[in-house]
Image (cartoon, rainbow, N blue to C red):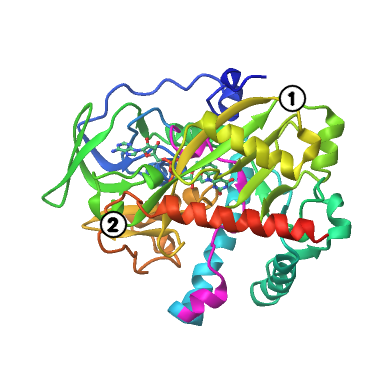
Amino acid sequence: MPLSSIRQTPFWHDQLGPMPTLQERPSARVDVLIVGAGYTGLSAALTTARGGRSTLVVDAEDPGYGCSSRNGGQISTSVKPSLEKLTAKFGFERARGIRAEGANALRWIGEFVSREGLDCDFRRVGRFHAAHTPGHYEELARDAETLRHQEGIESFAVPRVEQRRQLGTDAYFGGVVFSAHCSLHPGKFHRELLRLALGAGAQVVGQCRVQGIARNGSGFRVETAKGVVEARDVIVATNGYTTALTPWLQRRVIPIGSYIIATEELPEATIDELFPGDRIASDTCKVVYYYRASPDRRRVLFGGRVSASETTALAGAARLRQDMCRIFPQLEGVALSHAWSGTVAYSFDELAHTGVQDGIHYAMGYCGSGVSMAPYLGMRAGQKVLGLAEGQTGFDGLPFPTRPLYRGKPWFLPAAVAWYRWKDQRQFRKALQMT
Ligand SMILES: Cc1cc2nc3c(=O)[nH]c(=O)nc-3n(C[C@H](O)[C@H](O)[C@H](O)COP(=O)(O)OP(=O)(O)OC[C@H]3O[C@@H](n4cnc5c(N)ncnc54)[C@H](O)[C@@H]3O)c2cc1C
């Protein structure tokens, strides 16, 4: 199948019904205005609307335009730095509080989906995190022990000889299963959040870019593409799509493209061979790959970062396909149906951040792991606006670092990605040659 016949929209979008009818224009005055209608913004809106505040969410595009309907639908504990690293920086108690938020977000999303009865293919399938060299396997197995003892994180090591029970490949050197990790259908989850927010009475207005936020007495005057809105509180939930609208935040998040391909429908036996236990998967490469079966177990969805500079979804697809077939030679010759990308937000310390700057609430910087963390911190931001003590999080009060001369354009990224990709591939090849 020629690359040009691949649909350049997320596979997830094909399975969504029409967008619910939304209000065309925003009200002139609300209690809470939220910028960005992804998981963070809608979850914050649900919280403030249910808390009795008139709430408006605006998005520059259609709601869900950002990562929230484009991601891989994999849910982990979402805090990247280890307890040890965080302890060295912040001390043990603080570090434990930050790490605990990852587990809290993971637990929360399961409870939330079940309590609200959300139709989003949520499953507790577990993750197989694969080692791309024998050395990485040793390290993973050691870390799994530590994680279990120190943080109670359920995990077990799987040596290479047993790997095929988790994932149908010989390209890795064993790995670790995190049994509590989950998967969902990101597009359906976003639509369900939208349904709940609207049901709670929030207004959601699309194609309504916020162009300016200024103090106005004890509140804010917010200029949007569809008129001016007076708001008592503002929450910024723009993550990887943060712009000069909020320069302080723009200096603190690093926008990075992530790319996914979907295969055409495959025989049941192929999916059963590749994903025997329906686990989601990722690996120890520095420029990580993440992949899974689609919720209907008909396709493989394979994601990662394939080029040093940002590229088109189609150009990314050709390279992702090569990498996918290196891991799963069984997919050689299989056509792709979809290729798409989205922009995630990294932070300089690899932590999510939430707080209040110049009176404006924010939650962002999920470093590519926001499916549970984004709606969880959105909810916490909403609770803070309501003045509730449970809005406090382990991330509160942390410094949100930037770098000198950084203004939101990551000029350093292509060189860093090129270097790590080269290193990953070299390690991968060398390890496989030695077997
Ligand atoms: C390809 C890909 C794969 C991913 N895979 C995973 C995964 O498997 N697991 C995981 O945990 N995470 C994953 N992520 C990350 C996860 O999707 C995000 O962390 C999460 O969706 C962030 O949600 P959000 O609501 O904060 O931001 P977004 O969903 O990105 O929403 C931000 C919104 O802000 C809007 N906006 C920006 N500026 C303005 C303005 N001035 N006015 C109005 N609106 C504005 C944008 O239009 C956008 O809709 C992935 C991301 C991508 C791109």
Circle on res. 406: 2
Query: Which residue is located at x 42 percent, y 52 percent?
Result: 413
Q: Amino acid at mark 1?
A: Glu
Real-space Cα distance between discs 1 and 2? 44 Å
| Residue at x 54% of width, y 45% of height | 305
Element assignment for label 1: loop
| Image-based side of 167 in relation to 354, left or right | right
Q: Is residue 38 left or right of residue 121?
A: left
Q: Which residue type carries mark 2?
A: Tyr
Q: Residue at x 31, y 39 (%)?
A: 54
Is residue 87 part of the magenta span, yes or no? Answer: yes
Dividing the picture into quadrants, the one containing residue 292 is top right
> What segment is highlighted magenta in the picture?
64-88
Foreground mark, 1 or 2, reads: 2
Question: Going from the N terminus, do you reach mark 1 or mark 2 first?
Answer: 1
Residue 270 is left or right of residue 138, and the answer is: right
Identify the residue under disc 1. 265
Q: Is residue 212 left or right of residue 93?
A: left
